[in-house]
Each structure stands twice: as C-alpha cells, then as structure tokens.
Amino acid sequence: MPRIHINPKVSVSVVFVAAMFMNIMDITIVNVALPSIGHQFGVAETALDAVAVGYLVSLAVFIPAAGWLGDRFGSKRVLLFAIAVFTGASVLCGLADSLTELVAFRVIQGVGGGMLTPVGMAMLFRTFPPEERVRASSILTVPTAVAPALGPVLGGLLVTDLSWRWVFFVNLPIGLAAFAFGLIFLDEHRQPLPGRFDLPGFLLSGIGFAAVMYGVSEGPDKGWHSAQILGNLILGAILLAWLVRVEMRTPRPLLKLRLFGNRLFRSTSVVLMFAMAAFLGVLFAVPLFFQIALGLNALQSGLNTFPEAIGVMIGAQLASRLFYPRIGPRRLVAAGLVGVACSVGLMSLVGFDTDLWWMRLLMLTMGLSMAQVIVSSQAASFATVSHADTGNASSLFNSQRQLGSALGVSLVTTVIAAVGAVHVVAGRTVPNLTAYHAAFLTAAGVALVGAAVALTINDADAAATMVRRTVARVTPAGGGRPATIT
C-alpha cells in the first residue's frame, strides 16, 4: 500500500503543536491539583513542591542534549520517543500510589518534555524557509498562549468533577493522537556528521542547569539565605562557568555557545528570556491574585485569565500577516514589551471593588502585546542560523527560555512573600493586595528591560524573514479584470 503523503509543513506543525500544547498545559494544570494530591497522600503542603520542581529539574537536564540527539538519531525518531515517554509517564503519574512514586514519574515525564520542544522547534524551522518563518512562529503561539490559560480551567473541572488523577490522564488521548499522526506522516531528518556525544558538556550543563533551576524554584519557599538554596545556586554558577570554558574548546560541543556570536540570535534569545520571565511570572501571579486575594474559585480564576489566550491568538495573526513584514522585529518586539509592561502595570490598580471586566481587558491587551514579541522573536531568531546548526540553536534557545520562565515565577513569588500575602487589619487577617500589586509592577519592570534589549536587534539581519504574503492574480477565462487571491 502506498504511503499517504501530506505537506511536511502541515505534518510537522500538527505534531509539534499537539506535543507542545500537552507539555506546556501540564505545568499549569498540575498546580491546580496539588491540594487534592496532598490530601490524598496525607502530606503537608510544603512537600508538594517536589511534584513541580522534580519536573522542572528534569527538563533542565535534557533540554541541552535534545539538539544532538535529534541530529544523531533522527528528529522524527527522537520526537516520537519524547512524546511516548511523556505520555507514558503521564499515565504512571495518574496511577501513582504515593508522593514518592508521583515525583519519580514526574522526573521521567520531564525527560520526554525536555526533548519535545527543542527537537520539534528544530524540525519546524528546518521545514519552513526563512521567508515563511513568521508563519511558523505564529503557529507556535497557539500552545504557548492557550495551554497556560486553559490549564487552570480544565484542571479545576477535572479535580472538582472527577479526580486529581485525570489531570495526568488527559494527556493520554493527545499523546496517542500526536504519536500516531507523526508515525505516519512525519519525514525523518538526520544530520550526516553530528559528531561524538559531548559527555563533559552534558554532565556540566545537566547538573549546572538542574542546580540553578532547583535554586530559583525553591528559593522563595525555603528562603534565599538558606544554605541549601545558596549551595545549589553557587554550585550551578560554577558548573555553568566551567561549561562555557569546556564548550568553547570542544570541536563539536553539545551546546554550541559560539552561536551567541550571531548578533541576531543573541539579541532575540535574550529578549525572549526577559519576555517569558515577565509573561510567565504574571500568569503565575494572576491566579493567586484571583483566588487568594479576591476569593474566586479555580474555575472562575481560569475563566478570567482566558482572555489572555484570546489576545495572543488574535495578536499572532496581526503580527504575522500585517505588522512584522512591514515593521520588522526591532520596533515590534520593543513596542510589544512596552504594551505588556503597561497592561501588567495597570493591574496594580485593581482592588477589591474594581469591576473584573477591567482585569479581563488588561489580560486581553497583555496577550495582544505578547503575541508581537513571541511571533517576532521566534521568527527572527533562526534567520541567520545555518540548517546544520538549527538543532544546536534550538537547544540553546529553549534553555534560555526555560530559565527565564523559572526566574519570572521565582521573582514574583519572592516579591509577594517579601511584602506579605496577608496582613492584619482591625484585628483580622485579610489578603494584602499590595503584595500582588508589587509583583505586577516588578513583572512590568522586567518587560521594560526586555524592551530596552530589543533595541539591539538589527532589522537588516532579519530581512529574509520580513516577506509579505504573496498575492496571486487569476484572470477569468473570458477576459476581464483579474482577481487577486492571497
């Protein structure tokens, strides 16, 4: 039987969006289930952070190796393996009988999750030529925007009506469908000379990133002066500094740090790190603001957060079809981050008596603004990266983005804790809105730093991606005025 063939741009987009959606949603949907998990296993709330931290640390270990694995064993094979590991571990998480088992399965889940995004992104940008990168980047905004917003809504429904175990089981149909579709329709790609596996680079990057991720994730809870936190941060910094020294001297490094010599790749990667710190920090703080400060339930909180996803989806279309080809990444990214800063900064004015429609409007405008940043930076990042270096660049790009996300959540959590989430008024303990307002202003400040860095982007470097949609002219058979089709 002849094999059914579909456009590789379609097949790669479908599999990658499904896999990335599942991966990103998992982080937010699990957070909703943590109280129920603690009650089920009879453990203190402070012990539950291992469920999230174990996953994040595992991600940090395997993201750097993903590019080489895809080049060596084939991107299709590695992506499908990652989907299978992530999906299988999700089922095991749902079947866990103790917190220890759950954390162990989350670590395995992180192995798959760590390979999913870098390998899938490399496949996407190898499939789409530079002049179509903005279109590919707009595809990436779907899971990036919708998954974090949908997670709390779906998680609240599943935990309330079924069980916490279903926040893991929900990955099964998505994972099976993505795996089957990819197995049939994806084309294989393997670099001819990937080189030997850089074991020193893997150990230094894995342990170094894991130590830093653990430190920034646990710092707000355990205290930044804790010997455990300081020890991990110092160890991570030393190992990552050693990593730079080793990788710069290795002929075929696991992390090709020389790519940071590429002006466009360096600028857009750093900008997106600040952007994701601000964006994910806000998406972490807003549900706390809704539920703890304003007293909404998980479902109401998720529904009030969801306008952000709508904003990103609309904004992505505006960016890819209208703004990016005409304006270019430099001004569009800077303007987008200023828009994010203004939207988030205005959230600091929302109080107990403020109509929530204002908050929904600000979530919408934040999404519209952030879409300009995500689409533009991702479209431009790989414009001057060679086909052979795309896998290495994807690992570097995603390592920075993951670190930025963790730093953003850690920063807003630290600010809320430092100010105090509650305070005593007239002898009663009540939510302290000032803590959340300070967190919003802090995230807005991070976005403004990103906007300043965006001014280092050179539009001329990204010229190959600034191509307007082609317009075809069709002349009717009987003559007459030709019609235009975009």
Image: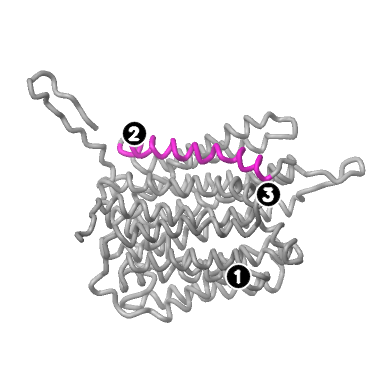
Q: Residues within 10 Å of mark 2 (few under 14, many from 20)?
A: few
- Residue under numbered circle 3: 160
Residue with the most extreme front position: 1
Q: Nearer the viewer, mark 3 or mark 2?
A: 3
- N-terminal label among 2 and 1: 1
User: Which quarter of the figure has residue 238?
Assistant: bottom right
- Residue 20 picture location, percent across and down: 45, 55
How far apart marks 3 and 2 lie (CA) works out to 42 Å
Q: Amino acid at mark 3?
A: Thr
Q: Nearer the viewer, residue 86 or 347?
A: 86
Residue 322: give its label.
Answer: 2
How far apart marks 2 and 1 lie (CA) works out to 43 Å
Q: Nearer the viewer, residue 314 or 97?
A: 97
Indicate whether 474 appears above or below 156. above
- Residue under numbered circle 1: 233
Residue 37: give its label.
Answer: none
In the displayed structure image, the side of residue 110 where residue 46 appears, left or right: right
**What residue is rendered at 60% in x and 55% in y?**
409
Q: Amino acid at mark 2?
A: Leu
Q: Nearer the viewer, residue 209 or 166?
A: 166
What span is colored magenta in the figure? Answer: 298-325
Q: Residues within 10 Å of mark 1 (few under 14, many from 20)?
A: many
Q: Nearer the viewer, residue 223 or 125?
A: 125
In the displayed structure image, the side of residue 282 where residue 289 appears, left or right: right
Q: Secondary structure at mark 3?
A: helix
- Residue 171 picture location, percent across and down: 51, 57
- N-terminal label among 3 and 2: 3
